[in-house]
Structure formats: structure tokens, C-alpha cells
Amino acid sequence: MKPFLDDNFLLGNETAVKLYHDYAAKMPIIDYHCHLSPKEIYENQSYENLTQVWLYGDHYKWRAMRTNGAEESLVTGGAGVSDYDRFLAYAKAVPAAVGNPLYHWSHLELRRYFGVEEILNEKNAPVIWEKVNAQLAQGGFSARDLIVKSGVEVICTTDDPVDSLEYHRLIKDLPDFEVKVLPSFRPDKALEIRRATFLPWLKQLEQAAGREVRDYDALLAALAERIRFFHETGCRVSDHALDAMGYAEATRDEAAAIFAKALAGEPIDAEEERKYKTFTLLFLGREYAKLDWAMQFHMHAQRNNNSRMFEKLGPDTGYDSIYDGPVAGPLVRLLDALERDDALPRTIVYSLNPNDLYALGTAIGSFQGGGVPGKIQLGSAWWFNDTKDGMLDQLKALGNTGLLGRFVGMLTDSRSFLSYTRHEYFRRILCNLLGEWAEDGEVPRDFDLLGGMVQDISYRNAKAYFQFG
């Protein structure tokens, strides 16, 4: 019987062991999609205790705590609740999380960053609390320290078009920090024309762009200006939350009329929303193509399910799930509309619904080419799918429908500076899968081939694909 989390954790054969330790383990990390705060990176956020570095803002852990029966004050904080109380509530939840990747991630984070080998539970919680807090007090565990210790080379944060990007520029000038922290262009609020955030956001765009946005042409011009501003600050990737994938052909005049209705405070129906989003998204795709950016579509999240808790806590607090609507038809029409104009940028598509993997994997095969290896990517297992099974399903679907060796690999999609162990988790799973194939005689036990493939997927493909410079 293997011990828990030993050096060969998740590596079930000799080939996998060699692939991981000799080829994967020491490769740098390119985290091309995350939600880390550039302000916290610049200010080099430090932490007084384990709860601050581990539980603040981590909605993965919050969901587990709620499911284990913790009161909300112990999950997201409240009057009279200490950070230790919150940590203890999580420690009580972890034993029930066997089978959930949180069980692995939590222990990997404790071991890799703090050398804590105790199993997390209510009994061991006081010892672990004291051990970690003593190390935090000694220093060396600030935000930038954790990034460097993790072997990170590039970080792409998630940024609204109205952001000043001041912290990205300040980080670039730090004398002793060589990690590239680059923005990603996330114009969701420009597309969500039916949401209450739309008109207030337009005011912010006017301020950021230094121009009035009184008609649709002005909106597109302002967005194009912000794209170029982001480009000058090092941005090479956009991102879109397309929770329900839709497509409806529209003329520029139709989109302009719909925008004018929204400005006037008139209601927009669902079909008008699809037309406005389609035309605007096609415009943005063409702008990205001009600059040779990569475009990301994160699809099929059903967000803010619990309206009472949304009103209390806001978004991104652990009340989302998988959406099960159509995806392949509208996505193909959108990609084809850009391809017809020879304006389809490098594109990565992710779906939160694992049932979409083969539909997406075959759809993207229709739009490869242009001399770019893996130009259209089936994105990594995301959010509810970045489990062992979810990662294997994504890798196998990509292998069956495309070229696994051209995959750009894992990302964190996280707000936590401790989440880089997810790259280790992914690499171990990848190596074990390739090792199983080799041990079963399905692929050659050729380490030049398989080891090179592991290093490509872990690092080199992303470095070439995104061209961060």
C-alpha cells in the first residue's frame, strides 16, 4: 500500500514516475488565466495567519464548509468570528471531502509551502495552525514570495477594459521581481446589455477612454482604444464569460439601435441581446486578430443561483453551477463568421459542462490552420472539472479528437497564491496517463517522445502560443 501523498502520488507505474520527476516537475509555470490581484502582488501582500492566505476569497473551500454545516459567519466572516474559528470550520469539513480534489489540494498546499505533513482534521487543526502561523511570522511567505517559490514565469490577471492597469506597470518596474504579471482583457460588462451594471459601467468607460459614449460607434471606438492600451501594457489575451452561448446575425445598424434602446432605459429582449452580443463579439474578435492575441471563451457557467445569498454576498462566492444549454451550434457560427473574414484569432474554448467536450473537440478541428500549431484549443478542465476525473476526461477527449501534443496545458483560474499546486496535480495526472499508455504498449516507451510531450504541455506550448515576449 502506498503512503498518502508520497513522492509518487498519482503515479501508478515506472514510466509515469520517470516522466514526472525527470521531465515535468521542474518546468516553469505560465498561468495564463487567473484572478489574482495585481494590487496585492505589487504591495507584496503578507499574511498574519493561515486563514488569511488560505480561506479568504476561496469559494471552492467555502462551498465545502457550507455543505459540512458551517454557519455563514464561519465561511465568509462575521462579527465575533475569529480567523481561527474559520480555519477550524474548514478543518472539520476536510475529512468529509475524501473524493473531492480539495482533499488533495489542501494537503498539497500545506506540504509544498509549509512542510506540514499532518493530516488536516479537527484533532490536528491546532498543531497545523501553530506551525503555519509561526512560519508566516518569520517572513518569506508574501504574495511575491509564494509566486517565486512556485516557479511561475508569467501570470495573466483578469481585468476590465476600464481598469487603469497601474499596478501592472508598477510591477514591471520592480527591481527584484522578474515574473511577468500581465493583464487580460475581460469585457463582459460591455456585452451584458440587459444587466443593471451596463449603464453605470458605460460611465466608467467614458472616464477611462476620455470620451463620451453616446452611440454604438463611440462604444466600439472606445473598446478598440482600450484594447490597444492593454496591448501596450503587455496584454496578449482576452477572456469572455459566455455563460449561455448564443449567436444571432445582426447588422451594425441593428446593433446600434439596440444599444440606443439600452441608453434610453428601454427593455431589451433576449433576441436583441443575442444580436447585440454577436455583433460586438465579432468586432472584438477582429480587433484581437489584428494584434495576434489569443481569445478565450469560458462557457456554460450558471451563476448566482441563490438569489438571497447573491444579494447578501455578491458574485463569486460559491453559488454557481454547470449550465446545460446548447453550445456547438452557436459557437461554430461565431467562429465561422470570423474565419470567413480571415479574422479568427487564436482561440481557447472551455465549457463548464463536461458533456460538451467531444462537441467542442470536434468543432475546433474545423478551424485549425494558418500556420499556427493548435490555433484553436480545447481548454483545460475548468472549475468544477479540475478534478482527477475531469482532467483525464479532457485529456482523453483532446487526444481522441485532436493533437494532445499541442495542448497549452493547465491554468489556476484562482484567487489564491497557494493554488499553484494545481499545476503539480495536473502534471502528475498527465504523466500517469501517458505512462499507462506506454506500459500497455499503446504508445512507445520513448522518453524523447513522451518526455518532450510532457514538457511541451506543461510549459513550452503555452510559451509559444501566447507570445508574451
Image (cartoon, grey):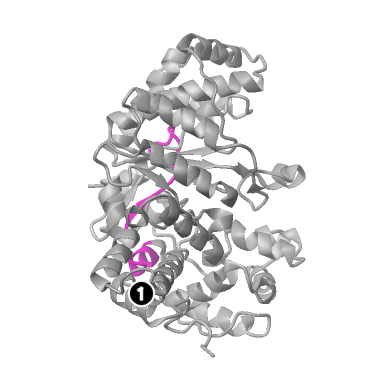
Task: Look at 43% across and 82% down and name the residue there.
Answer: 8
* Residue position for label 1: 20
Q: Quadrant of residue 283?
A: top left
Q: In the drawing, does residue 316 fall left or right of residue 224?
A: right
> Would you say residue 241 is visible in this rendering?
yes
Is 43 contained in the magenta span?
no
Question: Which of the pair 308/388 is nearer the observer?
Answer: 388
Q: Quadrant of residue 120?
A: bottom right
Residue 150 to residue 209: above or below = below
Is 151 contained in the magenta span?
yes
Q: In the drawing, does residue 177 fall left or right of residue 157?
A: left
- The range drawn in magenta is 144-164
Question: Which of the pair 27/90 is nearer the observer?
Answer: 27
Question: Which of the pair 376/142 is nearer the observer?
Answer: 376
Secondary element under disc 1, as helix, strand or loop, is helix
Task: Look at 30% across and 68% down and name the residue there.
Answer: 450
Residue 363 to residue 436: above or below = above
